[in-house]
Image (cartoon, helix red, strand yellow):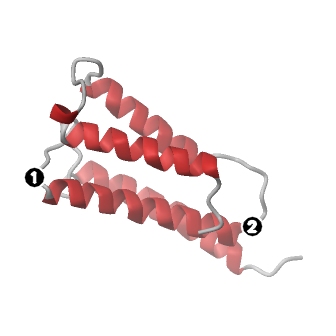
Amino acid sequence: MNFLNPFQMIYMIIITLLLIYDFFPVFFLSDIFSPEVLLGVMIGLFLSVLFKKDGRADHGAKFKEQLLYTFYLLSVVGVLTALGGRSAIGISLNDVFLWIVLLLSCCHIYSYWKKAKQPEI
């Protein structure tokens, strides 16, 4: 995937580690972070990736990036749930909040898709 830069890959690694910590706090030092801090960091990272303005006019690449992020995060939550983990902050595939955020993300992805399909002037 040549449309992801190293900075974006670091975001994905950090969010993955935070999700693993949230679902399996035994594997990390759970006394360092509270669930509220973890939730704040995850929301902050997600929003910074989602709304980052980089000046590119390549909406096709942004469409692919957002689609990848959304499916990746949904897959990680699914795998961690299937492995028997329980989120300390309440992230689950049955959570209404997760599906609302996913719906908002899909709206954002759709806007990039519409912009990518418009002819250049």
Name the front one of labels 1 and 2.
Answer: 1
The residue tagged 2 is 58
Could you tell whether 98 is left or right of 66 in the image? left
Could you tell whether 60 is left or right of 18 in the image? right
Could you tell me residue 62's position as x and y percent? Answer: 64, 64
Tell which circle, 1 or 2, labels the residue nearer the N-terminal end: 2
Could you tell me residue 43's position as x and y percent? Answer: 42, 38
**Residue at 30% over, 43% down:** 19
Label 2: how many residues lie within 10 Å, few (<14), some (14-19) or many (20+)? few
Q: Is residue 91 visible?
A: yes
Query: Which label sits on residue 84?
Result: 1
Q: Is residue 50 visible?
A: no
Q: In the rendered image of this protein, does residue 107 appear above or below residue 21?
A: below
Could you tell whether 73 is left or right of 50 in the image? left
Dividing the image into 4 quarters, which one contains the N terminus? bottom right
Q: Give whichever of 40, 26 is nearer the camera.
A: 26
